[in-house]
Every structure is written in C-alpha cells, then in structure tokens.
Amino acid sequence: MTNERLRAAMASGGWTCATLADRVGVDTKSVERWVNQGRTPRRDTAMKAAEALGEDAFVLWPGLRQSGRARSASPELVALYEQRADLPVSAITDVFRQAHHRIDVLVYAAVFIHEAYPRLNEMLRDRAQQGCTIRVALGDPDSPNVRQRGEEERFGHGIESRCRLALMHYRPLLGVPGIEIRQHGTTLYNSLYRADDELLVNAHVWGANAFAAPVWHIRRNGSGGMFDTYAESFDAVWETARPVEEQ
C-alpha cells in the first residue's frame, strides 16, 4: 500500500527518496519503502522527516498515533485512521490491485470508491481474469436494517438510494467469471475491504456516516486473530445474502 500523502509532500517540496534519506540519516531504500510500501518509520525518524517536509508527522503516518502498548498487543494492526475521510481511496484500490487469490467487499453502498476511482470495475475484472475470486456484498435497499441505518446516520432515505446506485456501479460485472455480487439485509457493524491477507475495517458509529468513523488496517498474522474474526463475519453474512441476477 503506497503512502500517497508522503509522495505528494515530497513532490511538492522537490524531495527525492535520496535527498530525504540523507536529511534524516537513513538509507534511500528505507524512504522508498515508506513511499511505495506504506511502511511507517520509527517515531523519531518520522518527526525528522516531517520537519524537513514541513508537514505533520501524524498526517503523513497515521499509524504513529497508535500507542506502543496497542501495537505490542495486536501484531496484526498495521495502521489506524481516526476517520475514513483520512484514508486515501488509493489505500483500498492498491490492496485490491495487489490481490492474487481473494477480494471481499462487505458494505451497504460505499459509492465513494467508484466515484473516486472510476476504473474500479476494470481493475476487478483484471484481477478476476488473473484467477482472483471476488465477492461483493451490497446492502439491500428494501431491508429494514438498511433503512434503520439510514435513520441512525441521519441520512434518511439517502442510504437506500446509495445502495441502488452501488448496484448500478457493480452491475456491469455480473456474469464475469470469478466475480459474484450479492445483496444482504443484515445489520452491519463494520464495512470490510479484504484483499488476500490485508483487511481494511471501517467501523460504523451511531449517528455518523461511515466517512466520519475510524478505519483500521490489519494484516493476518497466524490464525485465530482479529483478521480471522472479520473474515468469518464476512462469510456468515455472505451465506445469508441474495445473489443479484443478470438482467
């Protein structure tokens, strides 16, 4: 997962990986990993780099906000974002693009992905052609649970129209080998975006839209951890979901 904020800050100031590495006293490869792999440097190094770039270190590397205790208690936790609005859409599309075996999406609508990245269907179709199994579970706009969620986040009937719009976005993928779209009527406590062993979890908060709720990026580290808990939750919802038929 690339760090687009860091890339933009470096470009704005005319910094290269080599010059920034020289300024903060690390090797060039380390800076390349910060940019291209989304690695988070040590706190003191991050502070030096942010000072050189004239940026906030916690904006460049949101994972720095995690306490040392939290990191040691959960080796699966890669990064924590205070709001989904802080998460660039590329963080989601990049993990999808790198998937080789499985992509799972569990949402009510999440139309923001197609709006920010119109080539999403093309990328998913390419992943499927490369052998990736793709499952997308969207909210059923006629479900009382979906309508209840709309009332809770104070969008009223807006969420129902967003569910219908989401299906319009994904409908061209119906019938593509390796891709299945279903609609569910469950109460969602999190939206899930999985690509192989990478998982982005967008919490749902009563009274707030999902863009204002936290997101945590976790990576599978053995079995029986947080990743598997969410993966099993997806499978349970998927079993209850209704396949969308081609028209």
Image (spheres, rainbow, N blue to C red):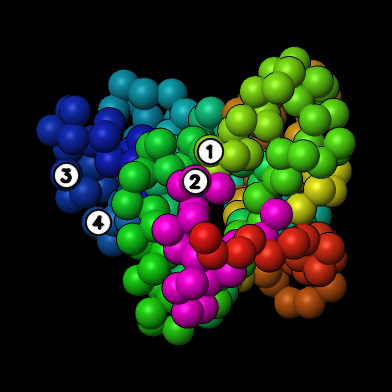
Q: Position of residue 166 (x, y in %)?
A: 54, 43
As shown in the figure, which amino acid type bears the numbered disc 4? Thr
Tell me if residue 181 is in the magenta stretch.
yes
Of callouts 1 and 4, which one flags the residue occurring earlier in the amino acid sequence? 4
Crowding around mark 2 (Cα neighbors within 10 Å: few <14, some 14 to 19, many 20+) is few
Q: Residue at x 33, y 61 (%)?
A: 122
Rendered-image quadrant of the N terminus: bottom left
Q: Position of residue 174 (x, y in %)?
A: 50, 65
Tell me if residue 9 is in the magenta stretch.
no
Q: Which mark is residue 51?
A: none
Q: Give the labeled residue for mark 3.
A: 16
As shown in the figure, which amino acid type bears the numbered disc 1? Leu
Q: Nearer the viewer, residue 58 or 167?
A: 167
| Label 3 vs label 2, nearer the camera | 2
Q: Give the labeled residue for mark 1.
A: 165
Q: Nearer the viewer, residue 161 or 15?
A: 161
Q: Secondary structure at mark 1?
A: helix
Q: Secondary structure at mark 3?
A: loop
Of callouts 3 and 4, which one flags the residue occurring earlier in the amino acid sequence? 3
The reply to whether dot 1 and dot 2 touch (C-beta < 8 Å) is yes
